[in-house]
Image (cartoon, helix red, strand yellow):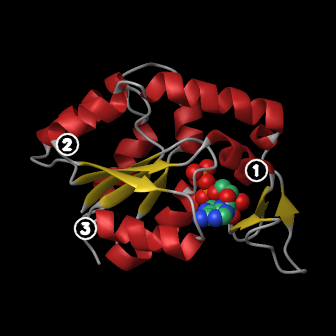
Amino acid sequence: MRVVFIGPPGAGKGTQAKVACLRLGIPQVSTGDMLRAAKVEGKLPAELIAQMAHGASGFLLDGFPRTLPQATALDRLLAARAQKLDRVVSIEIPRDLLLERAVLRRIDKRTGQIYHLKYNPPPPDADLEVRTDDREVVVRNRIDIYEAETAELLPYYEGLGILRRVDGVGGVDEVTERVLQALGSK
Ligand code: ADP
């Protein structure tokens, strides 16, 4: 199964992607860093292509593509391998909740585990770090950029009939249920 998760920063993509990948037995390709490296519109990061080539059983792209040129480039790449995306899950959540989720996000440096100071508190022995782009002013800016960039993306995937919108408000388990349902795995 080939899946894309899209949603604004703090929507819960990383959290849900981990669970969905375990459930579906597919690798999670986290694209944040690659995306920052890939400056050219419509050009896919080489690292992404390499990781996708390894995922014989499929893959889950978490946070990529972000723009229409990237989406069409991805489709062309897959088409060249006689493949296509099966599902695009858009995790949707109001702006004020996004800010709270991102600003209180903490990552365990050693394990990569995602925590939240209020909703998913880390254990006392966790070695926590704050992502530098999770400061409130930066998060606001990232949400604005996300909205501008992805405006064309949702209608594109809707047109292909593979878009599923998932309500991201609620507890992690509750959202997981909706995500698995959207993936047809529930
Ligand atoms: P994204 O990958 O979309 O930026 P994350 O998965 O990193 O988002 O989640 C952002 C923050 O919100 C993290 O601190 C995470 O623990 C927390 N979080 C994720 N899902 C939920 C949820 N359903 N309810 C409350 N907090 C959540």
Question: Residue at point 38% right, 32% down?
Answer: 44
- Up/down of 156 relative to 32, above or below: above
Quadrant hosting ligand 1: bottom right
For the C terminus, give its image quadrant: bottom left
In front: label 1 or label 2: 1
The answer to whether residue 129 of the structure is visible from this angle is yes
Circles 3 and 1 in contact, beta carbons < 8 Å: no
Identify the mark nearer the N-term, 1 or 2.
Answer: 2
Name the outermost residue toward the right.
Answer: 124
**Which element is circle 3 on?**
loop
Callout 2 crowding tier (Cα within 10 Å): few <14, some 14–19, many ≥20 = some
For the residue pair 44 and 133, the one nearer the viewer reads as 133
Left or right placement of residue 95 versus residue 60 in this view: right
What's the CA distance linking mark 3 and mark 2?
Answer: 14 Å
Question: Residue at point 56% right, 59% down?
Answer: 169
The answer to whether residue 25 of the structure is visible from this angle is no
- Up/down of 98 relative to 108, above or below: above
Callout 1 crowding tier (Cα within 10 Å): few <14, some 14–19, many ≥20 = some
**Which element is circle 2 on?**
helix
Circles 3 and 2 in contact, beta carbons < 8 Å: no
What's the CA distance linking mark 3 and mark 1?
Answer: 35 Å
The residue beneath circle 2 is: 78
Q: Position of residue 19 (x, y in %)?
A: 48, 73
Q: Position of residue 50 (x, y in %)?
A: 37, 48
The residue beneath circle 3 is: 57
Mark 2, ligand 1, within 8 Å: the answer is: no
